[in-house]
Amino acid sequence: MELKTIKNDIPNQLYEILDKEITKLRPAQEKSVKKGLLEGKNLLVCTPTASGKTLIAELAALKSILEGKGKAIYIVPLKALASEKYRDFKKRYDKIARIALSIGDIDSADHYLADYDLIVTTSEKMDSLLRHHAPWANSISTLIIDEIHLLNDPERGPTLEILITILKELLKNVQIIGLSATIGNAEELAEWLGADLVVDEWRPVKLHKGIYLDGKVEFY
C-alpha cells in the first residue's frame, strides 16, 4: 500500500512529514489501516522487531492529536526506552505536536503535562499519575502500550494489567494500540483489550535458523 493511499485519511501536517521519509507502508501497517487504525479501532499488533509497529502507533496518536480529540500516551517498560522514543518523536513531530517525557518522581501528579499532546512514560509512572489524580487524564484519547507481552512478567505485569484496566474504565472512548513482537496468547489478549488482532511475519532482514556444532552451522 502506497502512503498516498491514506493521504485523505490523515491530517495534512502529518502526511507532509511522513511523505519525506516513506513511500510505501509495510505489511503490518497496511493490515492495521485495513482493520480500522485510522477510524479509532483498538488493535493488538504482533509482528517481528523492525517491522514497523511504532509507525502504526504514531499514525493513531498524531491523527487523534491533530484532529483535536485529545492526548496520546505512549507507555514503555523501561526509562531508557522512554527516553529513546521521546527523542525520536521530538525529532520527527516537534513542529506539529507538544511532546513530553515523564519518567521522574513517582510522587507527583506532573500538572505541567496538561500542556502536552504526546506523553511518553513508563507503566509505573503512569500508574502513579493516576493515583495522584492527574487532572488531564480524562483528555487521553489514544493509549499505546509497547511491549504489551510484559503483562506476563511477574514484576511489571500486575502494574501494567491494573493500569490498562483502570484506563479502560476511566476512558470509555479511548483507542488502545498494543504492540509486541511475540505473544503466546494473542487471541485471548486481543479479546480482553476489545481489539482486533494484527499478525504478520514480515521483517526487513530474513531470519535464518540453524544449529552450530564443531565450527559449522547447519541451517534448516
Image (cartoon, rainbow, N blue to C red):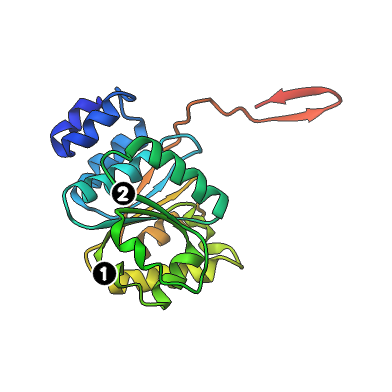
Tell me if mark 2 has few (under 14), some (14-19) or many (20+) residues whose alpha carbon lies within 10 angstroms of its own.
Answer: some
Q: Is residue 130 above or below residue 215?
A: below
Residue to which mark 1 is pinned: 138
* Residue 154 percent location from the top left of the image: 61, 67
Instruction: Please state which of the two labelled residues, at mark 1 or mark 2, is closer to the viewer.
Output: 2
What residue is drawn where x is 15% and y is 38%? 9
Residue 211, x across and y down, in percent: 74, 31
Horizontal side, residue 59 vs residue 217: left or right: left
Residue 98: assigned label: 2
Please, what secondary structure does the residue beneath circle 2 have?
A: loop
Q: Amino acid at mark 2?
A: Arg
The answer to whether residue 39 is above or below residue 206 is below
Q: Is residue 15 above or below residue 35?
A: above
Q: Position of residue 55 (x, y in %)?
A: 36, 39
Question: Does residue 50 show up?
Answer: yes
Q: Nearer the viewer, residue 129 or 113?
A: 113
Label 1 CA crowd tier, 10 Å (few <14, some 14–19, many 20+): some
In the drawing, does residue 150 fall left or right of residue 197? Answer: right
Secondary structure under the numbered disc 1 in the rendered image: helix
